[in-house]
Image (tube, rainbow, N blue to C red):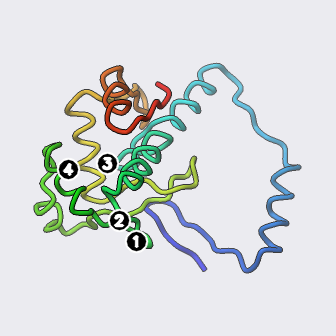
Amino acid sequence: MTEEAGRNRFFRLANSEIAEALEMLARVAPRRPPRTLRQSEAARAIKRARTCYDHLAGELGVGVTEALVERRLLDPDDDSFRVTRAGRAWLSELGIEIAALERQRRSFARACLDWTERRPHLAGALGAAFADVFFTRGWVQRLPGGRAIMLTPRGSEWLAREFGLAPSR
């Protein structure tokens, strides 16, 4: 059985024995380490924080999504999120107009499986609006040459103050 999420296609394994066999093969398969410092830095940057289409991903995107759920601003619901009453008020204070996002033709608050963290981050119209807030307020900035982004000192301060998060920059 396959499941599509953006550009990715995920396959469901038939049973746990197949999963165990694949995990054993992965343990003995040779790893391809980065060959240059540039490759190593790029790999770390993309894992730490990036955009996935138009929303936040990587450790940053997953961490923020989990913080939104822990604070009960979002409720996970299968492959999406539901914004709570408290979440609507909090997002409104950030300048995000929930009603306008809900009227869009695209999905509203989808759970997007993060390929580096293997946990969901917030996608859809709400994920894009949330990422826009991060860029507009200067909490993140794009790194040259790809989708990697960098959390700024101002963004780190906000995350620490708002959620108690201290993600690496």
Residue on which disc 1 sits: 77
Kindly identify the amino acid type of the residue bearing the numbered disc 1: Asp
How much space separates mark 3 and mark 2, taking CA atoms?
17 Å
Residue on which disc 2 sits: 81
Numbered mark located on residue 146 in the image = none
Q: Secondary structure at mark 4?
A: helix
First-in-chain label (3 vs 4): 3
Say which quadrant the N terminus sits in: bottom right
Look at 24% across and 56% down and name the residue there: 87
Instruction: Please indicate whether residue 91 sits to the left or right of residue 99 in the image.
Output: right
Q: Are marks 1 and 2 in contact (CB under 8 Å)?
A: yes
Q: Are marks 3 and 4 in contact (CB under 8 Å)?
A: no
Q: Secondary structure at mark 2?
A: strand
Q: Secondary structure at mark 1?
A: strand
Kindly identify the amino acid type of the residue bearing the numbered disc 2: Phe
Mark 1 closeness class: few <14, some 14–19, many ≥20 residues within 10 Å: few
Front position in the image: 2 or 68: 68
Q: Position of residue 155 (x, y in %)?
A: 33, 28
Q: Secondary structure at mark 3?
A: loop
Kindly identify the amino acid type of the residue bearing the numbered disc 4: Leu
Mark 2 closeness class: few <14, some 14–19, many ≥20 residues within 10 Å: many
Kindly identify the amino acid type of the residue bearing the numbered disc 3: Asp
Residue on which disc 4 sits: 91
Look at 26% across and 63% down and name the residue there: 84
First-in-chain label (3 vs 2): 3
Q: Position of residue 28 (x, y in %)?
A: 88, 49
Q: Position of residue 133 (x, y in %)?
A: 22, 39
Q: Are marks 1 and 4 in contact (CB under 8 Å)?
A: no
Which of pointers 3 and 2 indicates the residue nearer the eye? Answer: 2
Numbered mark located on residue 54 in the image = 3
Q: Are marks 3 and 2 in contact (CB under 8 Å)?
A: no
